[in-house]
Every structure is written in structure tokens, then in C-alpha cells.
Amino acid sequence: MDRVVAPDERSARRALRTQIARLERDLGEAFISAFPRVELDVSIPASGGPRLLSIGELEHVRDALVERLAEARARLDERGLVEEKNRELLERMLLEPGRYRYVRIKRSDLGEEGCGEWHVKPRLGLIGMLAGWWHVKLSSGCPLAGGPRASAVPPQLHTEGGQALA
Amino acid sequence: MSERGWVQRELAEEFPELALHTHTLDARPGASPPELRERLRVLSSRFRGMHAIALRRNPIPRAYRVFFRQIGLDPDTHRTPIEQAAVKRLLDGEFASQNLLDDGLLIALVETGVPVWALDAAKVEGPLGVRVGVAEHREGSPGRLPAGRILVADAERPLASLFGELAPGRGVQDHTSRMTLFAVQVAGVPQIHVDEALWQVISALGAA
């Protein structure tokens, strides 16, 4: 026998499903924006197979999506801050490379796609180092150069002394 | 071209856009012909990592993800069919050819985002539809399906859990000579895409 659903409950369920649809869309956009810079966990554990959810279960899904979306946006904001600071540092490196000797910034830590890194190096090797001739080079990078651990290196926020913050 | 299956009233009131589309045709399983294998190779070369990531932005895969959430499935664990195919493509390095039917189903899925399933028509009794199950025995497998599970069923018995496995013995076998295809349409999936998916499978089966 079909379950009878009161009109009020039906409209509440419809509203919750609409909210779930919108949150799933927003979470999907955040996930795409994050990749590959930030790894996001957007899963919401579920059990019981495909079924008609109760209002409480729909609310739980909605609330879990809200939480995931907030976490995702917070992580993206953090990442954006790191990248912005690194871009500011890169500008200073380009203006005064001699102050940032041997400092390296990966392109990925700037929010740029692809391999490679910006690197302050002496012109003409030892001669340049002794004479104080420094310049900034952009290396093409190699996906294998860092070895299998490269992807496990977290994004770096570099200080002006060239030291990376944890 | 396709017939519209029935949707139990409780489900239809909850999900007005939920629909089941079916088509029955004379077709036998077998090996995939060269032109179908070539289509899979072309699809493999067009489908890369970023396509897999950006699937969530595509309206039709997103529609199925939303529906999964709304029926208690986590699409990141119990993947939607198109995302499952995408992950497999990345892991295998290609859309691997298996056989005539599975290749046709895969091509339809990748081209349209709409999943299609195939049953042995001789094992289907009456029109197909979608309903909420009571605690019932599923032939060929031990135990019972829990009550409340959304099922694809014919007039007599459940044939598959929605977006899940087909009941044992109901799928296409070596001796099958007639197949019943079905596709599940949800909110946000245009009818034309469902029709196209079914047509793709029918066309592939006819190519043999």
C-alpha cells in the first residue's frame, strides 16, 4: 500500500531536495576549482542502498553537504592565501634577486598549472656568485625530477629568507 | 521509439521527473565488431583526466549525482555509472572492449552520460517499472532485499536494485536471443539524451 504523505511534509521534502541539488552543484564546482592544488574530501558516508529518505535523513544529507562545502571553501581560501603570498615574494625576487639567493618557488605554489619553478641563481656560476650577479630563472621542470614523493610535498609559503614555512 | 515504464505512485510523487524507458529487440550477445572497437579507441583518446574531473560540471552527470544524494547514495563511494566508467578509463588507460553488448552500453554511457542496462527479455514478465520494495526474496541470491529499497521490477519480481546489480540470471546470457534495454531518467536529464543513449545501444547491437 502506498504511503500517504501530508502536503506540508511533501513541500518540506521538495525544499530539502532542492537544497541538496544546489549544494551538490556548489560542492562540485569547489572540487573542480581545487583540483589538483588541493585535495578535498567531498564524500558523505551513506548506507542502506537506494531508498526513499525520511525528512530527517534528507536534513542530514543537506547538513553534511553544507559542512563539506564550508570545509572546501576554507581550504581553498587558505590555499589562495599561500599562493598570493608566494606571488608577492616572486615579484620581490624579480626586483631584487640578490636578496633572495637560491630561493625557489614552484609554479604550483603560485597557483599556476604545469611543472617548473622560479629559481634565483648566480649568473655565470661561480663568477656571478662572487661578483654578486644574480638573476631569476624559470625552469621547465620535469614531472619525474622530484621522484614519486613530489606529489606528497605540501604547498610551501616561502619567507623572505628563502625558508619555507611548514 | 522507447516505451515508458511505470513508476510507483509514492516514488512518482517524490520524484516527478523519474522515469524508466525501455526497448525490447531481437539481439544476440557476441564479440564486438572492428568498427565498435574503433569507436571505443576514439572515445578513449578523447577522454582524458581533466574530462573525468570536470564531469561534475556537466549537467547530466551532475543530475545523477544529485539524484544519488537524494536517494541515500554517496556518489563518491557508490559512483554514478558515468563516473565509474571515467575512473575505469583512467585506471585501464582506455575504454577496454569486452563484447558487443557491453561495448554498446559503454559507448552509449560515455557519449550521453545516460546509463543503459540490458535484460534477457525471456526472463522479463510484463512491463518494467520502478517501485519501492517490501522485504522480498530475490531469486538466485541468498537472503532478502531489505524493505524500502528502490527497485527496477517487472510485474512479478524485482530485477535489479536501482543503479545496482541485476538479479542473478536476469541479465543477458550466451543463449539470449531477445534483449530488453532500460534507461533511468532523473530530473535534469533531457529526454533526447535518454533516447540517444538507447539508440546508441540499439545501433551497436545492430552493427554485428
Image: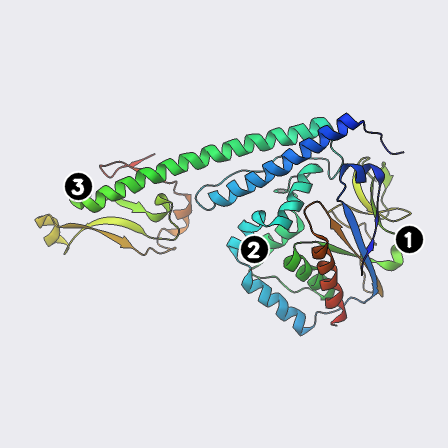
Q: Is residue A46 at all visible to an observer of this figure? A: no
Quick one: label 3, few (<14), some, or many (20+) residues within 10 Å?
Answer: some
User: What kind of element bears circle 2?
Assistant: helix
Task: Determine contact: label 1, label 3, CB under 8 Å.
Answer: no
Is A150 displayed left or right of B124 in the figure?
left
Categorize mark 1 by other alpha carbons within 10 Å: few (<14), some (14-19), many (20+): few
Q: Which residue is mark 3?
A: A99
In the picture provided, is B112 more to the left or to the right than A104? right
Q: What amino acid does circle 2 point to?
A: Leu
Chain for numbered disc 3: A
Q: Same subunit under labels 3 and 2?
A: no
Chain containing the residue with disc 1: B
Badge 1 is on which residue?
Answer: B125
- Quadrant, the N terminus of chain B: bottom right
Quadrant including the C terminus of chain B: bottom right
Give how far across and how far down residue B29 sits, in percent.
Answer: 78, 66
Determine the CA span between mark 2 and mark 1: 38 Å
Q: CA distance from mark 3 to mark 2?
A: 46 Å
> Which chain contains the residue that carries disc 2?
B
Specify which label sits upstream in the sequence, 2 or 1.
Answer: 2
Residue A126, how many percent across, how many down?
12, 53
Question: x%, y% of residue A46?
Answer: 66, 35
Question: How was this image coloured?
Answer: rainbow
Quarter location, residue B149: top right
User: For residue A8, what is the image quadrant?
Assistant: top right
When the figure is inspected, residue B184 is found, relative to residue B102, above or below; the finding is: above
Q: Residues within 10 Å of mark 2 (few under 14, many from 20)?
A: few
Q: In this figure, which residue is indicated by the disc labeled 2?
A: B91
Helix, strand or loop at mark 3: helix
Residue type of the residue flagged with mark 1? Glu
Q: Residue at x 15, y 54 (%)?
A: A123
